[in-house]
Image: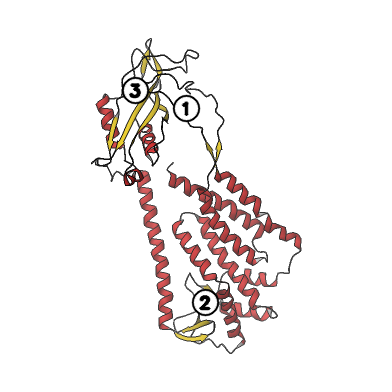
Amino acid sequence: MTPIFAYFLQVSICSVVLYAYYHFALRNHRFHQWNRYYLLFSALVSVVIPFVKIPLPLIPTLQDNTMLSYTASFVQLREQVLYAGEPKHIFEFNLASWSVLLYSLITVFALCRLTRMFFKIYRLLKEGELQEKSPYKVVFGQVIESPFSFIKYIFLPKNTDLASTEGQQILQHETAHLRGKHSLDNIFMEVLTAVFWFNPVFHFMKKELSMVHEFIADATTAKGNVAGYAETILTQAMHGVHPALASPLLQAPISRRIHMLLQPAKGSLLGLRKFMMLPVVLVCFCAMGFAIQAPPPPAVKLSLPKVTVENIHKESEANEIFTFVEQPPSYPGGEEALNKFLRSNVRYPEEASNKGKEGTIFVTFVVGKDGQVKDVKTVGKIRGNGLEEEALRVVQMMPKWNPGKQNNRPVNVQFNLPIRFTIQE
């Protein structure tokens, strides 16, 4: 699994766990501000936690087919020299490449849709009649079908009577949205769902956050006149649409809003649910944040670039690993074919190329009795800048070798392959 897909999977898992806690413990209760910040926090934490990595040391264990000694000699192949200036097969497409392309296209489409929303609000602002209602501005428009607010503007239908009780309630409701800066929440969630469009949980969070915004504004507006304000909500629910970025007075389902207005305050015991989020976040952090880190292999003394002779394991015939055999393994097509394979598949790391970093990476691996390449590791001085990762990636891609034989039976044979990365002048 590529790192980007692994990251997306971790984001999805975190968001599912955090939203599940909200749905079963916090949803439809009257701590609206807390729910608002919890939803925003959950979305942000889901995106950030996979980046947090706390290494845990791995206790070495002896497993099958594991080398018991690093001090023996190796069968060493000829050094392979790879240049940053060599031609690269940039346009090779596989399933992962097509997936990235599809993801990028849908993301661009979603971001274009978001830009279109901004443009639509801007057009309503330019075409409408503007009135100052300090510290906010009210825009009356013929094409505005229902009240909504955005940043510092309140958009109202042309025939809205602000002197009436209903008009005052509408104005007070939209003012509550502006004071709470709910438009910024909406923008954040729109960008998040555009980038992580494949994750349905973020879309649920966005919808639920919009509902919580309405609960907050309703609670502010309905003080002292719940029945009258409920009637205003029902009246406004009969017509109108609004831009997705806006904070509208109309927000389905209406029954939830009215139920929330009429819901009595609960005891303090219910408030404990708010703080139960801490162990939930801790579980996500521990599950995604801790990474097992294997200890670096001991340094080895490498032989000259030629075949050396020494048998290194005597204890288990089934799992014995040789560095000398009567009939050594061979790459299909010989060493020239191996050289061609490496030159065709190695991509000089962009980070190393940009920084002008060079160096030789020593890769050890075992050609198994079945010809499969396994136990791929790097040894020696760490060069960094992606050189080790690239050398490991390519060696792990190798096809089956012709297995080595000892006493006419296939055996495991260990190799050492130096790969030298160099900048071509």
Give residue 224's quadrant in the image: bottom right
In the rendered image, the vertical position of residue 357 relative to residue 17, given as above or below: above
The spot of residue 27 in percent (x, y) is 64, 61
Element carrying mark 3: strand
How far separated are the C-alphas under marks 2 and 1? 66 Å
Residue 298 disc label: 1
Observer-nearest residue: 64 or 20?
64
Instruction: Tell me the element at label 2.
Output: strand
Tell me residue 290's x, y (percent). 56, 42
Which numbered tag is attached to residue 76?
3
Q: CA distance from mark 1 to mark 3?
A: 18 Å
Which residue is at a point 67% across and 65% down the rendered structure image? 31
Tell me if 28 is positioned left or right of 178 in this view.
right
The residue beneath circle 2 is 148
The local crowd at label 3, few if under 14, some if 14 to 19, many if 20 or more residues have their Cα within 10 Å, is many
Residue depicted at 57% across the width and 74% down the height: 177
Q: CA distance from mark 2 to mark 3?
A: 72 Å
Pick the residue in front: 355 or 199.
Answer: 355
Quadrant placement of the C terminus: top left
Q: Is residue 318 visible?
A: yes
Query: Can residue 249 be seen in this snapshot?
Result: no
Q: Residues within 10 Å of mark 2 (few under 14, many from 20)?
A: many
Residue 3 lies left or right of residue 252; in this view the side is left
Disc assigned to residue 105: none
The quarter of the picture where residue 414 lies is top left
Identify the amino acid type marked 3: Gln
Amino acid type, callout 1? Pro
Comes first in the chain, label 2 or label 3: 3
Q: Which tag, 2 or 1, sits closer to the chain's start? A: 2
* 402, 238: nearer the viewer: 402
- Please tell me which of labels 1 and 3 falls first in the chain: 3
